[in-house]
Image: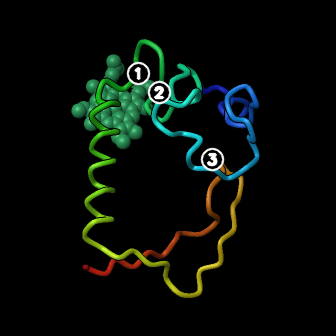
């Protein structure tokens, strides 16, 4: 069983410009982030992931450490194209090169 999360992701109720690619739409503390049934990668309701806060902190720490230690570049030949699958996502894997600083 699932629910139509796309209806939320493209709703002006939570996102001022819902069709715009804007990763900041999920910024911590934002309207959509705090609304119970919009930000749902950790599920929601009574059986919500108990590790949600820990996982979010760990993810931020990992990203901060990676950005501090590596110069991250896009691999050659990558052509960016978004597609609508289960999520609105890049059509192909994104080749990233990590160069130690
Ligand atoms: C990116 C990391 C994570 C994601 C995306 C994630 C996602 C989820 C989701 C979707 C569920 C609900 C599954 C269902 O519907 O039955 C869940 C449940 C759960 N998660 Fe996570 N999780 C993450 C990390 C963690 C961490 C770090 C912990 C513990 C330290 C954790 C502990 C749990 C537990 C115990 C449940 C069961 C909660 C219950 O049924 O009452 N998760 N998680």
Using the image, tell me which numbered label, if any, was put on residue 11: none
Q: Which comes sooner in the sequence, label 1 or label 3?
A: 1
The reply, left or right, for residue 98 in relation to residue 77 is left
Looking at the figure, which quarter contains the C terminus? bottom left
* x then y, percent, for residue 83: 71, 58
Task: State left or right for residue 16 relative to residue 63.
Answer: right
Q: Which mark is residue 87?
A: 3
Ligand 1 image-quadrant field: top left
Label 2 residue SS: loop
**Residue located at (48% from left, 21% from top):** 44
The residue lying at 48 percent from left, 76 percent from top is 95
Which quadrant is the N terminus positioned in? top right
x, y percent for residue 91: 64, 65
Residue at 56 percent of width and 46 percent of height: 24
Task: Report whether the residue tagged 2 is closer than 8 Å to ligand 1.
Answer: yes
Return the residue at label 1.
48
Viewer-closest of 49 and 64: 64
Residue 39 visible somewhere in the drawing: no
- Please give the name of the residue rendered at 58% of the width and 29% of the height, measured from the top-left corner: 32
91, above or below 46, in the image: below
Mark 1 packing: few (<14 Cα in 10 Å), some, or many (20+)? Answer: few
- Secondary structure beneath disc 1? loop
Q: Earlier in the sequence, mark 3 or mark 2?
A: 2
Where does label 2 land, which residue?
43
Q: CB of residue at label 1: within 8 Å of ligand 1?
A: yes
The image position of residue 38, as x and y in percent, is: 59, 27
């Amino acid at each position: 069983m699932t629910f139509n999360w796309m209806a939320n992701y493209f709703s002006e109720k939570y996102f001022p410009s819902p069709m715009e690619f804007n990763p900041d739409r999920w910024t911590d503390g934002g309207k959509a982030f705090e609304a119970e049934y919009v930000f749902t990668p950790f599920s929601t309701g009574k059986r919500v992931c108990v590790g949600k806060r820990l996982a979010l902190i760990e993810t931020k720490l990992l990203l901060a450490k990676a950005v501090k230690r590596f110069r991250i570049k896009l691999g050659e030949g990558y052509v960016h194209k978004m597609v609508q699958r289960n999520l609105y996502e890049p059509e192909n894997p994104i080749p990233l090169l990590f160069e130690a600083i």
